[in-house]
């Protein structure tokens, strides 16, 4: 059986404020156009020191980016990963880093007879597929990825490691 190859070009575009500048965490949610950003997307928070290569990022998906920005700005401990990432982003900002919000851009592609396109990200299965593709294509050697494996097995491994002192929270 021949292994099929899927070549997918992806790129990240800066989310822009109403004034046209790139959105940087923790700018107020009201600086973003709700009309433009209350849409489903795959996004990433990209952390870098001024003029330097990115050091940390988090890739996520949402059915409403405008609302998700508010979640990060007002994160609560009950929000799990959003809270954990928001704490890390605030720490990076306090250490002089710039945290930029970006959205994933990609060309429409087909898997068998199913197409996946940016306008179809309202479907959660397609959105999560694209998010996972972005995570897989992420260059971990160049930039630390903050995403955690939230599967049942991933949570068990994390718990076992923390009980045994193998990992610690940043």
Image (cartoon, rainbow, N blue to C red):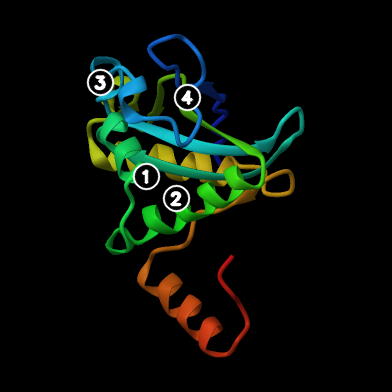
> Residue drawn 33% across and 51% down?
75
Residue behind mark 3: 34
> Residue drawn 30% across and 44% down?
71
At which x and y percent is residue 19? 43, 9
Q: Nearer the viewer, residue 55 or 104?
A: 55
- Rendered position, 137 above or below 66: below
Residue behind mark 4: 23
- Rendered position, 141 above or below 169: above
> Residue drawn 38% across and 12% down?
18
Contact? badges 1 and 2 (CB < 8 Å): yes
Of the image marks 3 and 2, the number of the one nearer the N terminus: 3
At which x and y percent is residue 66? 29, 29
Spatial CA distance of label 4 from label 1 is 13 Å
Q: Quadrant of residue 114?
A: top left
Residue behind mark 2: 86
Q: Quadrant of residue 29?
A: top left
At which x and y percent is residue 30? 30, 24
Residue closest to the far right: 52
């Amino acid at each position: 059986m021949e292994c099929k190859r899927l070549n997918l070009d992806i790129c990240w575009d800066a989310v822009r404020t109403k004034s046209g500048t790139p959105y940087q965490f923790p700018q107020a949610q009201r600086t973003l156009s709700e009309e433009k950003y209350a849409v489903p997307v795959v996004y990433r928070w990209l952390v870098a020191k001024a003029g330097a290569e990115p050091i940390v990022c988090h890739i996520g998906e949402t059915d409403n980016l405008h609302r998700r920005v508010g979640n990060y700005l007002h994160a609560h401990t009950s929000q799990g990963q959003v809270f954990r990432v928001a704490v890390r982003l605030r720490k990076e900002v306090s250490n002089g880093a710039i945290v930029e919000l970006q959205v994933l851009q990609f060309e429409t592609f087909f898997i068998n007879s199913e197409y996946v396109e940016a306008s179809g990200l309202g479907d959660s299965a397609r959105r999560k597929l694209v998010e996972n593709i972005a995570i897989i294509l992420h260059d971990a050697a160049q930039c630390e990825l903050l995403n955690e494996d939230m599967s049942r097995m991933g949570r068990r491994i994390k718990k076992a490691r923390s009980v045994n002192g193998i990992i610690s929270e940043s």
